[in-house]
Image: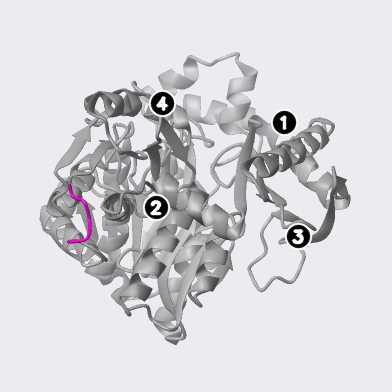
Amino acid sequence: MDYKKVYEEWLNNDFFDSEIREELESIKGNEEEIQDRFYQSLEFGTAGLRGKIGAGTNRMNKYTVAEATQGLAMTILSRGKEAAEKGVAIAYDVRHFSKEFAEITASVLAANGIKVYLSDDIRPTPVLSYAIRHFETISGVMVTASHNPREYNGYKAYWKEGSQILDDIADEVLYNIGKINNYSEIKNMDLQEAIDKGLVVYFGDELDDLYIKDMLSLTINDEEVDKDIKIVYSPLNGTGNKLVRRILEERKFNNVYIVKEQESPDPDFTTVGYPNPEDPKAFKYSIELGKEVDADILIATDPDADRTAVEVKNKDGEYVFLNGNKIGALLINYILSERHRKNNLPENSVVVKSIVTGDLGTRIAEKYNVEMIETLTGFKNVSGKANEYDITGEKTFLFGFEESIGYNYGTFVRDKDAVNSAMMIAEMAGFYKKQGKTLLDILEGLFNTYGVYNERLISITLEGLDGQARIKRIMDEFRREAIKEIGSIKLEKTIDYLVDNTGMPKSNVLKYYFDDGSWYALRPSGTEPKIKVYIYSVGKTKEDSEEKLDIIEKATRSRIDSIK
């Protein structure tokens, strides 16, 4: 793509509105900025679209959103009139332009004769997944950039099962986008006209009621739970506030305290900066409130309320952050042990995790004769197993999780679900509190039984064209030659998910197993300009496992730093 030529075309073409052209005028002469905005088109993939908001082909704006939607519309229409009548569900989060992008999506679909069910307000991502299944639509769109910084927005595309699209549909949408020669070819209809014609209908509280009812049906223990447990909750200025509070209230948890500074929607995420509860820094305000009210646990959800993080008070009154692997292991242990105790654990149950998620949950599942299934990274793949079992009836999907603080219990939703997870975490913590134990006590017990499993995630940000090229070089070099030995541990096995026959779709992930059970994996992020290194260790003690993390991190960082 000749980025200078495309920039000039956007700058001087009256088709683009004055705000877009004024923004482009303001960067005139800034070659680096112009290149970054126009060196490529924001590519549509299984993660849909995600990028910085702004003018340009490599940005989230009304033109790139409309183009993606036209490609989606063409994909739906290729399946006939019935698919168009089934329609598309659309929801959106609190970010800048989320509502506008959702309405543009609705307008383009309606102009193509496709029915739309449009959320009447901000809603969590799992509710969009639930809406697809409830309305039996052919597809769905969630306008969100999840936990990315405030400069970003995104467009997640879903298919009829309620999970995000896989490669086959994404490739078809991308092919159809490629047929669009210029933005003027994209169909559009005034939103009010679409509403008047019955092509766009709103959904709201009635769907929330059904969603909450189904989530409540997943309750395992109730009378055995201490409902006086003190919980601090923060939606991090996102979409979780209404439904997380409601479900905890309906479960009759009496002491739920909301972080006031982070209660209301704020597209700038002023109080948190980077609104990712995977980062313990996101808990600053929660900890302050937690100490004030002597809370037992702190729960935070990300802006689109599909991810959930937890901190637990220790014996010294300090709060300890639990990452996604540890929360996942605790939930697996609670769900399986309690359902086993109550004799309602299906014989053919499975738990599903991604290939970069830790192995403690696998050991726990083995105890209850529950199979652990591995999938590629991305909850679309985890949920894909539930979709598969719907058809085959071969197994029962019980629980799915990823190390990136995403979990889903049950099958009403086919994506990560922070509302469901917050309820189950509260139930689990209250259940153990009634026995005089904390989640830290339970985790310690699991370590005593299975060994100390530990993990560390390294994310290296490499932005722009140069960054993209360097990420490729890093993957190429590690693929060419592995690190054979780190300290006293020796490489035992390598899996290259791009070339090896793993039984999974091809993916640019490398995984290295050592002879003591430790391993690490490398993968470029699918949604951010980052390369990620996932490090896992197994030790006899906490110190032993942490020492292994340190030496693996040092060796992998050194190798990455040497690749320029």
**Residue 118 located left or right of residue 375:** left
* Element on which disc 1 rests: helix
Disc 1 designates what residue?
Answer: 466
User: Three-letter amino acid code at disc 4?
Assistant: Ile
Where does residue 248 sit, x and y in percent of width and height? 19, 49
User: Three-letter amino acid code at disc 2?
Assistant: Thr
Q: CA distance from mark 1 to mark 3?
A: 24 Å
The reply to whether discs 2 and 3 touch (Cβ–Cβ < 8 Å) is no
Query: Would you call the spot at circle 2 few (<14 residues within 10 Å), some (14-19), or many (20 or more)?
Result: many
User: Mark 1 or mark 3: which is in front?
Assistant: 3
**Residue 532, located in which quarter of the rendered image?**
top right
Question: Residue shown at 61%/45% (left/top)?
Answer: 455
Disc 3 designates what residue?
Answer: 496
Where does residue 454 sit, x and y in percent of width and height? 61, 46
* Element on which disc 2 rests: helix
The reply to whether discs 2 and 4 touch (Cβ–Cβ < 8 Å) is no
* Element on which disc 3 rests: strand
Does the segment drawn in magenta span residue 416?
A: no
Residue 314 higher or lower than 260, as above or below: below
Magenta segment boundaries in residue numbering: 223-227
Closest to the observer: 30 or 313? 313
Instruction: Give the mark nearer the N terminus: 2 vs 1.
Output: 2
Instruction: Give the mark nearer the N terminus: 1 vs 4.
Output: 4
Disc 2 designates what residue?
Answer: 69
Instruction: Give the mark nearer the N terminus: 2 vs 3.
Output: 2
Query: Would you call the spot at circle 4 few (<14 residues within 10 Å), some (14-19), or many (20 or more)?
Result: some
Q: CA distance from mark 4 to mark 3?
A: 43 Å
Question: Residue shown at 26%/45% (left/top)?
Answer: 103
Question: Residue shown at 45%/63% (left/top)?
Answer: 400
Q: CA distance from mark 2 to mark 1?
A: 30 Å
The reply to whether discs 1 and 4 touch (Cβ–Cβ < 8 Å) is no
Instruction: Give the mark nearer the N terminus: 4 vs 3.
Output: 4
